[in-house]
Amino acid sequence: MSEKIVVGYDGSDVAKRAIDFAVRQATAQNGSVLVVHVLEWSAYSFLTPEELEERHGRRREEIERAEAALMSPLKATISKAGVPVETMIKYGHIAKTLCEVARQTGATQMVVGRDGDGGLATRVFGSVAGSLVQIAPVACTIVP
């Protein structure tokens, strides 16, 4: 069975280190990489139909910007390394969405970066890395 590594990616330096780690792992294991960019999104049921339509328009624009600025260049870079790569942009809670993608795609491993910022927000709300360690359906590597 070929290894499939899901990588959470937001364009940050720590995310780039996670990509580098995942590409090395995929190369060593003759596997592939699925890079997932998750945009936080919450539903508002009390919006008017016009407001919902406008919001969905902004959502399409966000996806197009993320695809052009983050995912297309990254996909080209990883492909040059000889590793099969797919990209995906989703909306939702980051940790939960990454786990859902891992389950749905049959991933064998997940990789995310951690910046080590232990600020108040992280202590109160938690971090993506901390959440993944608790709920990941497959092995999860946290890259510092």
Image (cartoon, grey):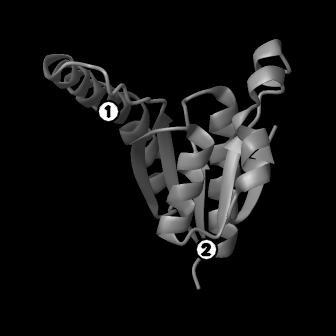
In the picture, measured across the screen, residue 24 lies left or right of residue 89, that is right
How packed mark 2 is, by other alpha carbons closer than 10 Å (few <14, some 14-19, many 20 or more), is some
Secondary structure state at the residue bearing disc 1 = helix
x and y, in percent, of residue 50 in the image: 13, 18
x and y, in percent, of residue 5 in the image: 60, 62
User: Which of the 4 image quarters holds residue 66?
Assistant: top left
**What number of labels is visible?**
2
Instruction: Look at mark 2 in the image and give the residue it sits on.
Output: 3
User: Which of the 4 image quarters holds residue 131?
Assistant: top right
- Looking at the picture, does residue 17 appear above or below residue 23? above
In the picture, measured across the screen, residue 72 lies left or right of residue 56, that is right
**What's the amino acid at mark 2?**
Glu
| 1 or 2: mark nearer the eye | 1
Screen quadrant of the C terminus? top right
N-terminal label among 1 and 2 = 2
Residue visible at 69% across and 70% down? 28
Screen quadrant of the N terminus? bottom right
Residue visible at 31% across and 21% down? 46
Picture disc at residue 63: 1
**What's the amino acid at mark 1?**
Ile
